[in-house]
């Protein structure tokens, strides 16, 4: 008679009481180490952590969620992780959240408001406890969805609350205004701008506004052909610079709303035979790591992405705990002056003719 094979019994799940026995402490001490380690003596913390490692203990997230009514998860929707400025902010956000036992879910919208709305719906259905967004431009339905979900939300990289959504970030308009004033003080009078301004990117729109306001204060008004709209890629920066110099070969200063566009513009200037900054000053925005490494190093605005990420985490943690929270947190930016800018020099007539004769491609 064949016997049925005996199935191995699954290992019983390690419980918090098992960890307590292994560490020779109370279950309450183990709980404090897991949830509030800063209030537990270092000696006890080490004992509990050793016991956790020896027993391969993991917390039962589902049980904790049922008990507390929270999943201890935060959702973040960013335009893209292809730009280091957002990746740096997300990393700081995740690190700060993990210190207090929260898990981060990340989605990207690709600068598409409808996609952002869909991603938010998906995150809310997962039971997230809070939401981090980017910028103040969102689909009208987004605010309704957030209100119905009843979860705290904060937006980042902007410094003004819009539609009741709190904000932590910088004054984008003020930053480019200061940058443009710096170029004016160097003696520049012939400007061009390269801007990525899709409907959802209110940060770049504010930066373009800052450029135009500073120039208007100086009696300079950009023509439509002096403002080249582009997406955020290096290739777009190159084609935009080519178009600008073809239409306005006497330009001496080009202000870009991102470092990526500026680095692309610098590459195209070199191809056109234009020295930076000898014949053309170029500036960016964000101060990504590459900005200091290109030749010449890029003058730009430094955005405190890590501070923004940590600030967003602190806001949500405090909001979930019912603590007082500000509506707006404005962080300082920095104007970083490097070698891509200098006082203007006259462009030789032969060089102007060469630039003018080139036809824009793409």
Image (tube, rainbow, N blue to C red):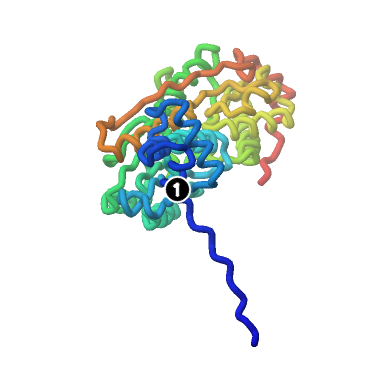
* Apparent side of residue 166 relative to residue 182 in the rendered image (left or right): left
Q: Say if residue 162 shows up in the picture.
A: no
Give the residue displayed 28% in from the left and 52% down from the top: 144
Total numbered badges shown on the rendered structure: 1
Q: Is residue 236 above or below residue 303?
A: below
Which of the 4 image quadrants contains residue 82?
Answer: top right
Which of the 4 image quadrants contains residue 1?
Answer: bottom right
- Horizontal and vertical percent for residue 228? 54, 37
Q: Nearer the viewer, residue 274 or 336?
A: 336
Q: Nearer the viewer, residue 48 or 264?
A: 48
User: In this figure, which residue is indicated by the disc labeled 1?
Assistant: 59
- Horizontal and vertical percent for residue 292? 63, 22
Q: Say if residue 88 shows up in the picture.
A: yes
Which of the 4 image quadrants contains residue 245?
Answer: top right
Describe the element under mark 1 as helix, strand or loop. Answer: loop
Report crowding for label 1: few under 14, some 14 to 19, many 20 or more residues within 10 A (C-alpha).
few
As drawn, the residue found furthest toward the front would be 1
As drawn, the residue found furthest toward the bottom would be 1
Give the residue displayed 40% in from the left and 42% down from the top: 133
Give the residue displayed 38% in from the left and 41% down from the top: 27
- Horizontal and vertical percent for residue 175? 44, 23
- Horizontal and vertical percent for residue 11? 53, 59
Q: Is residue 11 above or below residue 39?
A: below
């Amino acid at each position: 008679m064949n016997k049925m094979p005996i199935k191995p019994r699954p290992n019983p799940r390690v419980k918090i009481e098992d960890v307590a026995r292994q560490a020779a402490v109370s279950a309450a001490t183990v709980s404090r180490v897991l949830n509030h380690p800063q209030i537990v003596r270092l000696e006890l913390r080490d004992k509990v952590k050793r016991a956790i490692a020896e027993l391969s203990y993991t917390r039962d997230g589902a049980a904790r969620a049922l008990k507390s009514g929270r999943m201890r998860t935060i959702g973040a929707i960013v335009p893209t992780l292809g730009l280091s400025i957002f990746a740096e902010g997300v990393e700081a956000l995740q690190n700060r959240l993990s210190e207090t036992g929260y898990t981060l879910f990340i989605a990207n919208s690709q600068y598409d408001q409808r996609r952002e709305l869909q991603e938010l719906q998906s995150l809310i259905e997962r039971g997230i406890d809070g939401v981090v967004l980017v910028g103040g431009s969102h689909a009208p339905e987004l605010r309704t969805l957030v209100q119905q979900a009843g979860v705290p939300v904060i937006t980042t990289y902007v410094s003004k609350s819009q539609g009741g959504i709190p904000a932590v970030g910088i004054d984008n308009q003020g930053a480019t205004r200061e940058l443009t004033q710096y170029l004016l003080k160097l003696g520049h009078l012939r400007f061009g701008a390269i801007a990525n301004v899709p409907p959802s990117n209110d940060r770049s729109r504010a930066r373009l506004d800052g450029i135009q306001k500073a120039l208007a204060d100086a009696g300079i008004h950009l023509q439509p052909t002096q403002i080249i709209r582009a997406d955020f890629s290096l290739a777009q920066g190159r084609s935009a610079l080519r178009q600008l110099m073809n239409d306005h070969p006497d330009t001496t200063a080009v202000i870009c709303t991102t470092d990526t566009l500026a680095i692309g513009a610098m590459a195209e200037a070199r191809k056109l035979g234009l020295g930076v900054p000898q014949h053309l000053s170029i500036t960016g925005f964000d101060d990504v790591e590459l900005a200091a490494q290109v030749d010449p190093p890029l003058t730009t605005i430094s955005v405190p992405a890590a501070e923004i990420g940590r600030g967003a985490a602190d806001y949500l943690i405090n909001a979930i705990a019912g603590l007082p929270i500000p509506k707006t947190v404005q962080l300082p930016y920095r104007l970083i002056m490097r070698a891509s800018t200098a006082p203007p020099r006259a462009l030789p007539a032969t060089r102007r003719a060469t630039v003018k004769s080139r036809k824009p491609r793409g």
